[in-house]
Image (spheres, rainbow, N blue to C red):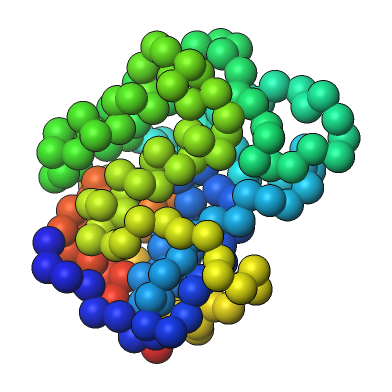
Amino acid sequence: MSPRPVNHPEIHAVLPPRLCAGIEDYALAWGCGSSGQDWTGRFDKRDKGTHRFMIADTRGPLALTVPIAKPESSRCRWDEVLISAHGAWWDVHRVALESAYGRTPYFEFYIDRFLPMLTVGVTDRFPRLMYLAMAWDAQLRDILGMPPSSPSPHGMPVIPDVAPPGPYRQVRQDKLGFIAGMSILDLVFNLGPEAQIYLHNLQK
């Protein structure tokens, strides 16, 4: 992919902690000089979006959740939360992704990059939720031609304005219509290199 144009080189975008974040987060980070997720906030079990992401399955939206271990303290931070091996969730996620995106133009091209996060031993490789999320994020940023995640130099969330994500080509759009609110994975598997153009066009 070509180098990304940077509209706001002076801005560091501080993003919420997310596993396979939505397109909106990557659109916000796209035009900034640097960006990264902030995992230092206090753990809140109600925030399921931190360890759950949405994909466009054969029948519509599907939530994939990584189970987390019960924290030892109610005051723990998100960067301390451990993931659980309950239910062999990595197999469930891998099969779901294959079912949802196996026929997309770029699934076979990219899926090998993600196998360390989708195969047995993942809880040893990435024992904390933050480590798992950062592994996904590192691969996605590389695919999108974005710089690696970095901590905030100021600790303040400064985010530029971007347009709301609009429709793009999805593999089952003729059957299900366009499905909004998906993880960045949906954009990558469906558009491949054109995902760069899509994110750039959302910049104001």
Whether residue 186 is visible here, answered yes or no, is no
Q: Position of residue 173 (x, y in %)?
A: 29, 52
Where residue 174 sits in the image (x, y, percent)? 26, 52
Above or below, 19 relative to 92: below
Give above or below for 11 relative to 192: below
Q: Going 16% across and 44% down the picture, which residue do you hit? A: 106
Instruction: Check the picture and name the quadrant holding the N terminus.
Output: bottom left
State the residue in front, 71 or 57.
71
Q: Residue at x 42, y 13 (%)?
A: 121
Counting from the top left corner in percent of width and height, residue 114 is at: 30, 32
**Which one is in front, 164 or 147?**
147
Seen from the viewer's position, the closer of residues 91 and 85 is 85
Instruction: Find residue 133 and report its horizontal and vertical position in percent.
Output: 49, 40
Please name the residue shown 23% across and 52% down the image: 143
Identify the residue shown where x is 40% and y is 12%. Answer: 120
Task: Tell whether 177 sits left or right of 156.
Answer: left
Q: Looking at the rendering, in which quadrant would you find the C terminus?
A: bottom left
- Determine whether, in the image, residue 81 is placed left or right of residue 168: right
- Residue 203, compared with residue 139, is above or below; it is below
Is residue 27 something one can see in this rendering?
yes
Q: Quadrant of residue 130?
A: top right
